[in-house]
Image: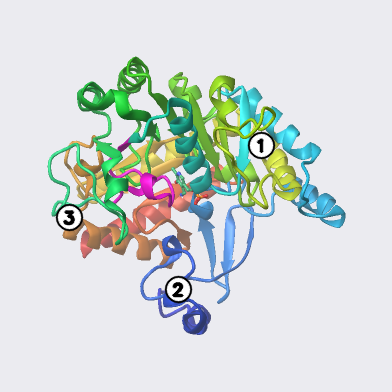
């Protein structure tokens, strides 16, 4: 059994080299692990090999985006077919229409689509579209929910007991965040309809939109209650505000995303990750009346939006290949794997006498080492002791050949078989035994 960090000398060397040319050797905060990240060499199906020759089951899948794992044959063929003909043009191509048609077909809430290059950009443009449509400044978001790097979307992302105060409250994520940004974002607790209704009663006339991920990963990967979403939509619409679903991750929950599962119709949806077939992507989807803010055919649009690599045909073709391969059967397969792992992990926690629970839906699950009733970000905010357990769990899984996110998130992929899920579960069980002994 390899042992992190000792069995990873080449990754250590690469990190030392990276430190000279990148701040902290890093160009993506989310992939850093202490004392150094594991450098990937190649991936195939649900497995990744690192530069030291260690092999892992990949349960991160590039933070949920590689729903077909690595080197999906259809996406490889699509990209190889496009590359000899050029990868990006200062002109639209047929491929953006094809991917837009496919997505509109899957999302009943969407009449139209607008592409972007990342989930961050998709969320940013959705917020700006809501502002442009309503001519209002404020947004409401969920405490602890991650939506990418737009200033407004980052508010109250990592609120902590020392600064979170009474809700609603707005805390800065990055140093130097302008006061005006905090003033225009109202953070509310997840799954609390009364709190959201109170905010809309008090500030409704100034609110452009509520931004919500129906199962926010960083806020605990706790599924929204349907009645909560219904009341949230009602309160927003009564105030003349829009509802933006961030489905950058949750679109991997079902054929029509989380909104299909919950049967809720947002005004706008931010997409990303899986829709690009492994390439940088984002999209804003919504009803035509709102999407008209982007329309340049009648003079300057209410919301101009460019992007040099937006809708490039490589991303579009990879995305089409990935989405076509993601059938209703794929979701049934992913749901079954997810259920096996959630149930098995909960049973393992019990067996080893550890407090905690494994939450999530479909192909996503997350471990919390707390026995508190779980409802929102604050209820799963880890204590120092729980953080130590999470760290042990994460590193123990690395030693057993399973990659997961350092904060306890797992994302499965379609090439995983039942036997793979059982092997992952055995590694989780063994690691939890080690955590219990520590
Ligand atoms: N929204 C959610 C829910 C996300 O999880 C992420 C990224 N993890 C984003 C938005 C931002 O997407 P990107 O990293 O592509 O900018």
Of 189 and 325, nearer the camera is: 189
Q: Which residue is mark 3?
A: 383
Mark 2, Cα crowd under 10 Å, few <14 / some 14-19 / many 20+, is few
Of circles 3 and 2, the one toward us is: 3
Q: Earlier in the sequence, mark 1 or mark 2?
A: 2
Picture disc at residue 113: none
Q: Which residue is mark 2?
A: 2
Q: Earlier in the sequence, mark 3 or mark 2?
A: 2
Q: Is residue 141 magenta?
A: yes
Q: Tell me the residue at 28%/46% (across/down).
A: 182
Place of residue 288 in the rendered image (x, y in percent of width and height, measured from the top left): 59, 21
Image: magenta residue range: 140-158
Residue 425 horizontal side relative to residue 179, left or right: right
Q: Tell me the residue at 47%/84% (across/down).
A: 16
Q: Is mark 3 within 8 Å of ligand 1?
A: no
Q: Which residue is mark 1?
A: 323
Magenta highlight: main SS: loop
For the residue labelled by badge 3, is the local secondary structure a helix, a strand or a loop?
A: loop
Q: Give the CA separation, mark 1 to mark 3.
A: 40 Å
Mark 1, Cα crowd under 10 Å, few <14 / some 14-19 / many 20+, is many
Q: Give the CA separation, mark 1 to mark 2.
A: 36 Å
Q: Tell me the residue at 32%/19% (across/down).
A: 239
- 406 vs 153: above or below: below
């Amino acid at each position: 059994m390899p042992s992190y960090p000792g069995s990873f000398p080449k990754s250590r060397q690469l990190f030392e080299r990276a430190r000279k040319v990148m701040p902290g050797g890093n160009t993506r905060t989310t992939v850093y692990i202490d004392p150094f990240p594991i450098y990937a060499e190649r991936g195939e199906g649900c497995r990744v090999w690192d530069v030291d020759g260690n092999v892992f089951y990949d349960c991160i899948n590039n933070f949920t985006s590689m729903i077909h794992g690595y080197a999906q044959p259809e996406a490889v063929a699509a990209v190889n077919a496009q590359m000899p003909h050029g990868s990006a043009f200062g002109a639209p191509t047929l491929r953006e229409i094809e991917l837009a048609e496919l997505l509109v077909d899957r999302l009943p809430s969407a009449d139209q689509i607008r592409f972007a290059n990342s989930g961050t950009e998709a969320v940013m443009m959705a917020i700006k579209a809501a502002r442009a449509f309503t001519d209002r400044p404020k947004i409401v978001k969920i405490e602890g929910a991650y939506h990418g790097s737009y200033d407004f979307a980052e508010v109250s992302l990592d609120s902590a007991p020392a600064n979170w105060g009474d809700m609603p409250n707005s805390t800065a994520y990055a140093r130097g965040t302008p006061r005006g940004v905090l003033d225009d974002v109202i953070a509310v607790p997840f799954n609390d309809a009364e709190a959201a209704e109170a905010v809309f009663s008090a500030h409704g006339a100034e609110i452009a939109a509520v931004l919500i991920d129906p199962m926010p990963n960083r806020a605990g990967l706790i599924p929204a209650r349907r009645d909560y979403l219904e009341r949230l939509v009602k309160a927003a619409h009564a105030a003349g505000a829009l509802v933006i679903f961030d489905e950058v991750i949750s679109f991997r929950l079902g054929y029509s995303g989380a909104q299909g599962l919950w049967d809720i119709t947002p005004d706008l949806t931010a997409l990303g990750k899986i829709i690009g077939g492994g390439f940088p992507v984002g999209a804003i989807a919504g009803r035509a009346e709102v999407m008209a803010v982007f329309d340049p055919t009648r003079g300057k649009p209410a919301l101009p939006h460019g992007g040099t690599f937006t809708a490039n045909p490589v991303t579009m073709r990879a995305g089409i290949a990935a989405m076509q391969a993601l059938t209703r059967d794929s979701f049934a397969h992913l749901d079954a794997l997810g259920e096996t792992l959630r149930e098995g992990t909960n049973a393992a926690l019990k067996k080893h006498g550890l407090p905690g629970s494994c939450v999530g839906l479909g192909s996503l699950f997350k471990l919390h080492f707390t026995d508190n009733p779980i409802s929102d970000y604050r209820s799963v905010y880890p204590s120092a002791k729980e953080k130590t357990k999470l760290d042990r769990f994460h590193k123990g899984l690395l030693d057993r050949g399973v990659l997961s996110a350092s904060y306890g998130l797992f994302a499965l992929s379609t090439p995983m078989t039942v036997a793979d899920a059982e092997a992952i579960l055995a590694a989780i069980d063994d690691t939890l035994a080690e955590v219990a002994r520590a």
